[in-house]
Amino acid sequence: MPLFAENKYVALLRDNPDYRKLYFGQIVSLLGDWFEFIAVQTLVFQLTGSGLAAGLAIIASTLPSFFLIPLAGSIADRFDRRKIMIAMDLVRAVLALSLLLVRTADQIWMVYVFQTLSVVFASFFNPALNAAMPNLVRREQLLTANALSSATWGTMLAVGALIGGVAVATVGRDMAFVLNSLSFLGSTFFVWRIRTVLNQLRAAAHKPLNPFADFVEGFQYAVQRPQVFWLLLVKAGGGLAGGVILLLTVFSFQVFEMDAQGVGLLQFARGIGILVGPFVVARFVNGRIGRAQHFISIGFFVVGASYLLFGLAPTIFVAMACVFFAHTGWGSNWTLSAVLLQRLTPDYIRGRIFSMDLGMLTLTLAFSTFITGAATDRSNPHLVAYMLSATFVLFGLVWTLGVWLSQHRVPQHWQDGLISAARVDENAEPVLMGVE
């Protein structure tokens, strides 16, 4: 059967109208995001010629999320997730237009300020979205829904990066900033039309807001459960070598000398990889936890090997192939960790878990991006690629060993069975059951 002939994805959208609205909102918003990403990276690199300066733009658009982990997770668990997403989209629509003010190198600081403000509000949007997913689809559809969402993220990256690279090179950056602003308004429209209740509020939601106590509760929940703890490290581990994202810009300008068009082509390959990876892994995993663990380990090694070959690539087209294979692994890992966290965590604490998940990713990604930017300004970018490749492989080994050592603390149905949580009330733990 052809890969994309799976009718379960069509059935998912057909049978879940409110999930369909959220999905269409994601499509619109993500397309604008990647237009802006290409425009910002091109703007900073052209005005400064510095890999570190371009890296700081990525850091400004990620790191603040780490410091908002306690508050963002608490808000997502205590308040209406639909209203949170609408409010955050509206604010970001205004902030997207602020980048039109940046015209010269001495105004680059404005990019960092506006990118920081944008990610502050995204820090509240993303945990609310991920925590709301199990309220929109049936539990047995979560793998399908996450695979579709991740693939859509990759598709919009591919389309947005390719078209964005051409558009920035031909008609300029300003159009990308305007389109990104409009995309947030489009997302707002679709989320506003959702009618499903996206929270199962419990009594604690009506107590005074205490982000620190809420964070401690979520942290204790994770560390007491090895399966949740190691899943929280999947995205963070990828972030340790996340400087490869900046490396795509550096290679485009300094190695392949293709400027914005090159950035667009490499990001296009990245997006296609993220599109394909979740669909492939969903077919092989089929909900089985043991298989999911094995594919997460494989994913780390695939990314590491692919970026080793990327550093050796003689042409941008060979480099695109390497980036494609790398991000099939990255996209697979992102999807598997997300769906398993959604299945393993009850509604009342899910927002905090996903806030930690994304927050730790932004911390490691910012660290890696800073080191990568500084290294490419002082040494051969090929050497930097080899170092990042080794980081992926080493963390994959650590993660695999950690999961293996924790197996004695985990029930057999975690290792061999399907997760089933047909009975979860607002205060109870998920019921994990082996299913033939």
Image (tube, rainbow, N blue to C red):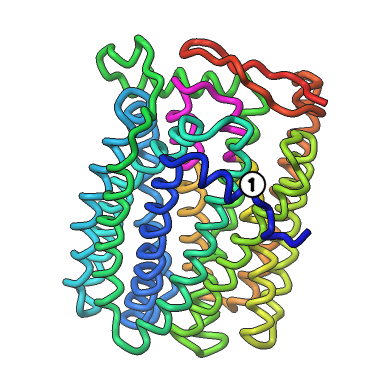
- Nearest the camera: 187 or 18? 18
Identify the residue at image location x=52%, y=40%. 15
Residue type, mark 1 in image:
Lys
Spot occupied by residue 358 in the image (x, y as percentages of width and height): 47, 42
Q: Is residue 345 magenta?
A: yes
Q: Say left or right for 9 vs 395.
A: left
Spot occupied by residue 174 in the image (x, y as percentages of width and height): 24, 77
| Residue 391 in sight here | no
* Main secondary-structure element of the magenta-colored stretch: helix
Span of residues in magenta: 338-358
Q: Say left or right for 413 vs 313.
A: right
- Nearest the camera: 174 or 83? 83
- Relative to residue 335, is residue 108 depicted above or below? below
Quick one: SS at disc 1?
A: helix
Q: Is residue 374 magenta?
A: no
- Relative to residue 172, is residue 15 depicted above or below? above
Residue 45: image quadrant is: bottom left
Labels in figure, total: 1
Spot occupied by residue 90 in the image (x, y as percentages of width and height): 22, 50
Identify the residue at image location x=72%, y=36%. 287
- Nearest the camera: 377 or 164? 164
- Relative to residue 254, is residue 73 depicted above or below? above
The residue tagged 1 is 8
Q: Say left or right for 107 vs 237.
A: left
